[in-house]
Image (cartoon, rainbow, N blue to C red):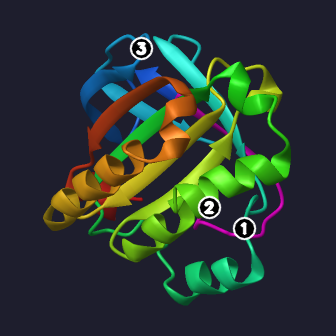
Amino acid sequence: MPSPAYVSLPQLFSFSAGVRGEWSIVSVNAVTGDSLAAAPRLEFTSGEVDPGANWTLRGFTSNARYTTRSELATLGAKPAPLGRASATRAALIPIAKSAAWWVLAQDTRREILASASQHIAIGSEYLPAIARQLHHSRDLGEPFDFLTWFEFAPEHEQLFEQLVTRLRTTPEWRYVEREVEIRLVRDRRQATDR
């Protein structure tokens, strides 16, 4: 699994829910809008997609958008790589924002995300305990605009709950029209076999 890179070349990833994958799906819950079908496992890959999957979501990593130089420095000061053996809990949160969000000018979206909502600052508070990687999907014609992948150790599950609760109360979330939270567990044997 790749480490999060705040400035990186785009790389396409697929999240496939079915019978394959190192992550067991614990729950699939609609936060806003329609949910996704349940499945026993999730495969996260940059390679071939399982044709028998219940569903597959695709997204690509990119440079950090809406981020200032000082915010990048803060994020880089607390490295939180994905794939740590201790991080046996994960969440995949696909999000679709409303048309009203996308007609706003980029500087207005930046103001809502960073200044009014403090999205970047809030997320930084939980580093390095909560590792995360944003995948962009809107430009691929996917049903969600973003796929956010989080990994954390079992003892940091309450921190993760705090993080998502805080973000969901911000002005930015008024523009979210569909959000699904998929909780996952990786057993230690699979974590060490990688």
Q: Is residue 10 magenta?
A: yes
- Mark 1 crowd level (few <14, some 14–19, many ≥20, 10 Å Cα): some
| Highlighted magenta segment, given as a residue range | 2-15
Q: Are marks 2 and 1 in contact (CB under 8 Å)?
A: yes
- Look at mark 2 in the image and give the residue it sits on: 114
- Look at mark 3 in the image and give the residue it sits on: 36
Write the residue at 46% across / 65% down: 123
Write the residue at 69% across / 85% down: 70
Asked if residue 98 lies left or right of residue 125, the reply is: right
Q: Is residue 88 shown to the viewer in this render?
A: no
First reached walking from the N terminus: tag 3 or tag 1: 3
- Type of amino acid at the residue the image marks with label 3: Leu
Residue 143: x and y, percent?
Answer: 64, 17
Instruction: Please tell me in which quadrant of the rendered image residue 74 appears.
Output: bottom right
Viewer-side label of 3, 2: 2
Q: Is residue 71 shown to the viewer in this render?
A: yes
- Type of amino acid at the residue the image marks with label 2: Ala
Write the residue at 44% across / 66% down: 122
- Residue 67 is marked as 1
- Mark 3 crowd level (few <14, some 14–19, many ≥20, 10 Å Cα): some
Viewer-side label of 2, 1: 2
Name the residue nearer the viewer: 38 or 123. Answer: 123
Which secondary structure lies at badge 2?
helix
- Type of amino acid at the residue the image marks with label 1: Thr
Residue 144: x and y, percent?
Answer: 62, 25
Q: Are marks 3 and 2 in contact (CB under 8 Å)?
A: no
